[in-house]
Image: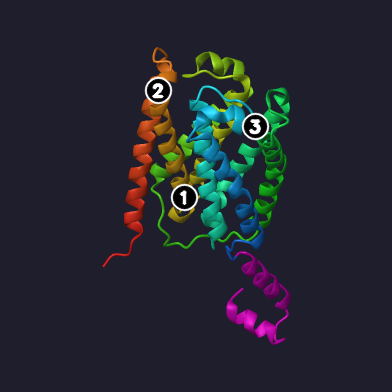
Amino acid sequence: MTDLTCAFARQGMDTTRGRCDARVMISGAADDRVLASTRAVAWFIMPFLLVAFAVLWPVPTDTATLFAWHITPTLTPMFLGAAYLGGAYFFVRAGRATQWHTIKGGFVPVATFATLLGIATIVHWDKFHHSHPAFWLWAGLYFTTPFLIALVYLRNSRHMAPGADDALRLSAIAARLIGAAGALAAATGLFLFLAPATAIRHWPWHLTPLTARVLGAVFCLGLAGIGAFVDRRWTSARIPIQVALVMLVLILIAGVRARTELATGNALTWVFVAGFGGLTVAVAALYATMERRSRPTA
């Protein structure tokens, strides 16, 4: 139905007016806007993640007194802290975003992460410091966040708009590689979460069943990469890639800080070192290339 036909219909000159009104409603809904409720949830969650990062990453030896449970060795709290700072950065961007498609890719991974940590809390309830305020903040966050994130995602997704035909896009190869990396990370996360006893025997540093499941939740944040299979727009990938770079750099620094905790005789240790190092360089190079291509030429 053409816009001209709809114009006549609004003047009562055509019987197709009802269909035109429906079209206007659909067009109005698909405006790609970020709802106020989405921003409110983002700003609500962000400070908790920032505080958790400040507790876990800079001084990972103080978890017994400052965190919801005592975590050893120090590489594990730093790994989790890297995820928290990445999450805090994502929610800052979500709180300031004006286009839904630029942030939508982070909500399903965050909801999965929070859900898995909520389940891990119930399964390993006896391992936590129940009298510590940090525990009640932890429990309150992970028993509510999955529902909040799911709610705002479902509500805001109604405003999803198709991308312009001339939008800058990732190459098909780059999109497949990002999607494959995300799928591999998610598979690793599920392995850690569902089979912690097996993972403990092969992991490059010491884990307990609880920390194995916590790391599994962190790896499941890789679900964000799978979105590249279906949405190759650079504006959709830009913020998730920024988040990934924040996390990867912090994880690499953590590995250097806690290098004595790594099992050097374990082949998987060197796979991790090469994998995280190579992935960081590749993601940084891709980001620089796409940012250069996104700038207007003279």
- Residue at 67% x, 75% y is 20
SS category of the residue bearing label 3: loop
Q: Name the residue under label 2.
A: 259
- The amino acid beneath tag 3 is Ala
Q: Mark 1 points at which residue?
A: 237
SS category of the residue bearing label 1: helix
Magenta stretch in the rendered image: 1-30
Q: Residues within 10 Å of mark 1 (few under 14, many from 20)?
A: many
Residue 242: give x, y in percent of width and height.
44, 47
Residue 44: give x, y in percent of width and height.
64, 52
The numbered dot on residue 68 is 3
- The amino acid beneath tag 1 is Ala
For the N terminus, give its image quadrant.
bottom right
Task: Decide which of tag 3 and tag 1 comes sooner along the chain.
Answer: 3
Residue 158: give x, y in percent of width and height.
65, 58
Q: Gap between marks 3 and 1, in whole Å?
A: 33 Å
- The amino acid beneath tag 2 is Arg
- Residue at 38% x, 21% y is 270
Q: Gap between marks 2 and 1, in whole Å?
A: 32 Å
Q: Gap between marks 2 and 3, in whole Å?
A: 25 Å
Count the labels in the image. 3
Q: How crowded is mark 2: few (under 14 residues within 10 Å), some or many (20 or more)?
A: few
